[in-house]
Image: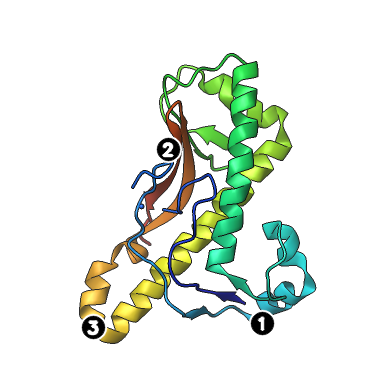
Amino acid sequence: MIVQGAGPIPAAGVPYALSARVGGCERADSGVRGGGDTVSISRTAVTLAHSGLLDDLFGFEPAVSGRYTLREIELHARRFLSKFNSDFRSLLRENGVRLDTPIELGHAPDGSVMVKNDHPHRKAIEAIFSEHPELRNEYTKITSMLTLVEHARKAGAFHQAYREDSRAAAARYASLFTSSASVGIRISEHGTDIVLHHRTRRSG
């Protein structure tokens, strides 16, 4: 079970998933602070939660066995991001890659980590992930966890708004039905930012 917690999580060296610059890390606002709603998941997912497989997937054990809160998932994701940030910057220095131009990371269609912006060292950066699969896997785990949190919060906000005014909610959250979003990471000499990548869904 994944439960939505209330309020922002204290800083842990990386930005609050998706809002104002704090400690050198910029935060992009999701517009949702969460409530007390429970996110419904299938029986299969419940079985996975109690089997311990989600512990391996997320990389941590929840405070209550089988019960993952969005706050916990986000907190641990940002802790993992703090270490990833340190390891990745060390490898950049070893490979002579400067951060004069920010690096915006994302996923390619084949699941590999790619540089999404026009960067003079794109090939060298992407090679780092090819040569260090553990770094690639860590990036994928972190961004998947943060993407899950973002989607769950927006879905919770939509359902709350829908109960109050269905027509207004459908208009306000239309992007939930017309586009998909995933989390990426931007690394620069000024800090590390969590960013949202939007992609319009194809109709038909």
Cα distance in 3D space between marks 3 and 2: 39 Å
| Location of mark 3 (residue) | 165
Q: Is residue 163 left or right of residue 51?
A: left
Quadrant the N terminus occupies? bottom right
User: Which colour style is shown?
Assistant: rainbow
* Element marked by disc 3: loop
In terms of image quadrants, where is residue 118? top left
Q: Is residue 4 left or right of residue 140?
A: left
The amino acid on which the numbered mark 3 sits, given as a three-letter code, is Asp
| Location of mark 1 (residue) | 43
Cα distance in 3D space between marks 1 and 3: 31 Å
Task: From the image, state whether disc 3 or disc 2 is nearer to you.
Answer: 2
* Element marked by disc 1: helix
Task: From the image, state whether disc 1 or disc 3 is nearer to you.
Answer: 3
Figure check: 73 above or below 155: above
* Element marked by disc 2: loop
Regarding residue 111, the answer to whether it shows in the image is: no
Query: Residue visible at 36% across and 73% down?
Result: 157
Mark carried by residue 34? none
Of the image marks 1 and 3, the number of the one nearer the N terminus:
1
Q: Are marks 2 and 1 in contact (CB under 8 Å)?
A: no
Query: Residue visible at 58% across and 44% down?
Result: 81
What is the crowding at mark 1: few (fewer than 14 residues within 10 Å), some, or many (at least 20)? few
| Location of mark 2 (residue) | 24
Cα distance in 3D space between marks 2 and 1: 42 Å
Q: Indicate the position of residue 72 as horizontal and vertical percent values.
A: 59, 64
